[in-house]
Amino acid sequence: MRTRTVSDLHLCPSCGHGIVRARPLTAQELADGAPQDNLAVIGCCATHSDPAVVAVYVPAVTVAAWPTITADIAIDSFCPDCGDTATGCKYLQREVVGLAALVEAQMQAEGLVWQD
C-alpha cells in the first residue's frame, strides 16, 4: 500500500480515465537525484502496473496542464494511494468534491445500503 500524501489529483495522461496523484518531491528523492522542478506522480498507469515503481518524475509545468479530477470521472476510477475503487475509498470520496454524494446516489439507485 502506498503512503497517503497531500497533493493534487489529475486525470491520467496515459489512459485518459484513471487518477494519478502529483506530489512534491521528498528530501530523499531530491538526494537520490530527482530533478528539482519535477513532481512525483503515483497511481494509474504511472505506478500500478509495476509495484516496484514508487513514483515517476514529471516536470511540474507538464503536470499543471493535466486536467484535475471531477466526481463524474472519479466514480469509475481507482484511488492512486490504495488502489481501491472510488466507491470503497473514503479518503478519495473526501478529497474529490462531490464524489461522496455521487457514490451515495449510485448506491441508493442500485438498492445498496451504505455502511461506515
Image (cartoon, grey):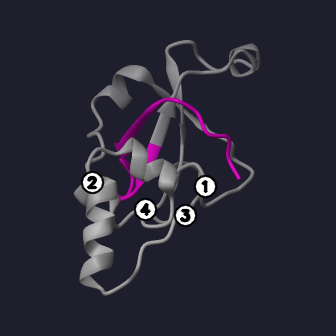
For label 4, the SS is: loop
For marks 2 and 1, the one nearer the N-term is 2
Contact, CB < 8 Å: mark 4 with mark 1?
Answer: no
Q: Is residue 97 above or below residue 22?
A: below
> Looking at the image, how many numbered discs can be counted on the residues?
4
Q: Position of residue 98 (x, y in %)?
A: 26, 50
Q: Is residue 6 magenta?
A: yes
Horizontal arrangement in the rendering, residue 103 relative to residue 59 (left or right): left
Dot 4, crowdedness within 10 Å: few (<14), some or many (≥20)?
Answer: many
Q: Is residue 50 above or below residue 34?
A: below
For label 1, the SS is: loop
For label 3, the SS is: loop
Q: Which of the numbered marks, if any, corresponds to residue 54?
A: none
Which residue in the structure is indicated by mark 4? 86
The alpha-carbon separation of the residues under discs 4 and 1 comes to 10 Å
Q: Amino acid at mark 3?
A: Asp
Q: Amino acid at mark 1?
A: Cys
Q: Which of the numbered marks, if any, corresponds to residue 71?
A: 2
What's drawn in magenta, residue-wise? 1-20
Horizontal arrangement in the rendering, residue 38 relative to residue 98 (left or right): right
Horizontal arrangement in the rendering, residue 35 relative to residue 115 (left or right): right
Q: Position of residue 49 (x, y in %)?
A: 60, 61
> At 42% from the left edge and 73% from the top edge, which residue is drawn?
114
Contact, CB < 8 Å: mark 1 with mark 3?
Answer: yes
Q: Is residue 5 magenta?
A: yes
Q: Position of residue 46 (x, y in %)?
A: 53, 48
The alpha-carbon separation of the residues under discs 4 and 3 comes to 7 Å
For label 2, the SS is: helix
Which residue in the structure is indicated by mark 3? 84
